[in-house]
Every structure is written in C-alpha cells, then in structure tokens.
Amino acid sequence: MKALQTAIVFAAIGVVVCLWLLTGVRWYNFLAFMLVAQPLLLLAVIVFVVATLREVKRKGLL
Amino acid sequence: MRWALGALLLSPGAALGATNAVPRPEGWIGTAEEWSQGLGIALAVLTLVMLAVAWWRLREGARPRELFGTLFFGLAVLPLIVIYFGYTKGFSGMETVQACGGCHVMTGHVNDLENPMSESLAAVHFKNRYIRENQCYTCHSDYGVFGTLSAKADGMGHVLHYVTGTYTLPLKIRHPYPNVRCFECHAGSQKFLKSPGHPAEIQPQLASNEVSCLTCHAPAHTPAGAKQ
C-alpha cells in the first residue's frame, strides 16, 4: 500500500513537471523535465512493478 | 455586406489584418505543434486525475488488485505518452531563438541577431528572413539525423554549463564553423556560383573547409555592439 502511494506521488510530481513544460518551454523546465520528471516517472513504474510482483507472489500465483 | 461578413469569417488571417499587415499563414484548426501541445496537456491532466482517484481509493481501503487498471494506466501507460509529447514540445521549443536567448550570457548575441541596424552575418540572415525560424539552431546544427542529435546533446551541455557556471566569457565557438552548414543553402545557387568572390579555383578549398566562409563574411555576431 505504502509503495503504491509512493509510486503515485513520484508519478504525480513527474507529470506536473511535464505539464509545466507543455505549457511553455524554458531552459529551466526543460532541464527539470530531463533530469527530474523522467527519472521520477521511471521510478514510479519500477515501484509499481515491484509492488505488483510482490502481491502476485504473496497470493502464490508466481 | 453579407459577402463581406462571410469573407471575414472564412478568412483566418482577416482578423489579424488590422494589427499585422502580413499575417503568417496558420491552419484553420491550428498547427500540428499546437495539437501536440493540447493533447499532451489533456493527457497530463487525465493522468493526474487518475492518480488522484487511485490515491483516494487506496486511502479509503481499496485493495490494490481492484485498482490495477487505474494504476497501470496512471503510472505506466499515460505517463509514457505524456513524456512523448513532452519530448516533442521540449525539443522543438528548445530550437527557438527565445530558448537560446533564455540564458543571460546569450542576450548580446540575440540582441545583435534581432537588431535591424546590425550588419553581422547572423543579423543579415535574420532581418532578410533568409532563415524563416529557429535561426540559431539552423546555423548551429549539422544536417541529417546525427547533426540533430549532436546539436541536441550540445544544447543540453550548454544548459548544464550555464547552470553550473562552468563557462568562460567571452563565449567562443568550440570548433571552427564548418562551411557545409553554409553550403546547405548557398551551394549550387547562381548567386554563389557566379559571385566574383567565389571563383572556381577556390571552391574545392571551401568544400574541404581549408578556407572558411567566415574569412570573408565575418563577423558572424557582434554581441558587444548590439543594442541592449
């Protein structure tokens, strides 16, 4: 549960940075998009996959 | 009267005519870039809504299995599409003169470029619209796929140097300016071929970069003399 909530927070921050870039490109929001948004979104996916695999393993499906 | 009203409504540039003598052509449903931006924003908002719903339902005690679809789309699928639109918008946005001028160290160069009184090579190209848009990027990127990639990587490097303060003034071009960038537009044109300044015997030297175009056509920029 906590892991999924963490993934949601990471993804939300990443998407907000993307939204900032999409409303108008400046060098600072482009830099934030490259160095902050993408790693956070990747991290969110990793956390989501790990949490899902754990759940599946716990249920004995894997 | 009716005809005039119809013409006004049907002509996309008509409303602009009053303020801008020669309006730039635009599609009546917007450009591809505007659509890409709009879709990107819409999907980003949709992602945030899905994430908020998932967060709220988790707090309410819903089991993760019940939210798998929402989480899968909100965390994995939609952000990927949003990143794609972010790249599209970000990379095209970073090609503009405004983006290059966003760093204070480039202000002099951009002021010179946009100064109609300047006779620098860049300003001459700008004021005569020899290059329609993204003038900095067009002249400072090589052609072809690798030229684009290399220019983007260089651009990121410039931003990092600017942020970390690891640059020295006055700014200098890192490598000698390659003539091939000039040739992309000028080579083969009658004006270039018939110019007494480009006799046939010097053209191989120009092609091999032995003689730089800037030997005769400098300065490319006069940032110090630009109107601030």
Image: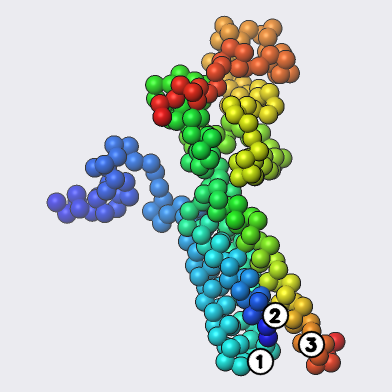
Q: Position of residue B128 (x, y in %)?
A: 43, 26
Where's residue B131, x and y in %?
Answer: 50, 31
Residue B78, compared with residue B146, is above or below; it is: below
Identity, as a three-letter code, of the amino acid under mark 3: Val
Q: Secondary structure at mark 3?
A: helix
Residue appearing at x 51%, y 51% in the figure: A25
Q: Amino acid at mark 2?
A: Ala
Mark 2 belongs to which subunit?
A: A
User: B1 or B192, which is in the foreground?
Assistant: B192
Which residue position is annotated with label 2?
A: A3
Indicate the quadrant where residue B161 lies: top right
Residue under the image location 61 percent in, 24 percent down: B182
Mark 3: give few (<14), some (14-19) or many (20+) Cα within 10 Å.
Answer: few
How far is the residue under mark 1 from the one under mark 2?
13 Å
* Element on which disc 2 rests: helix
Q: Which residue is mark 1?
A: B63
In this rendering, do the residues under marks 1 and 3 share a single chain?
no
Mark 3 and mark 2 in contact? Answer it, CB < 8 Å.
no
**Residue in the image at 58% along x and 88% along y:** B59
Q: Which residue is mark 3?
A: A56
Q: Is residue B201 above or below residue B48?
A: above
The answer to whether dots 3 and 2 both sit on one chain is yes
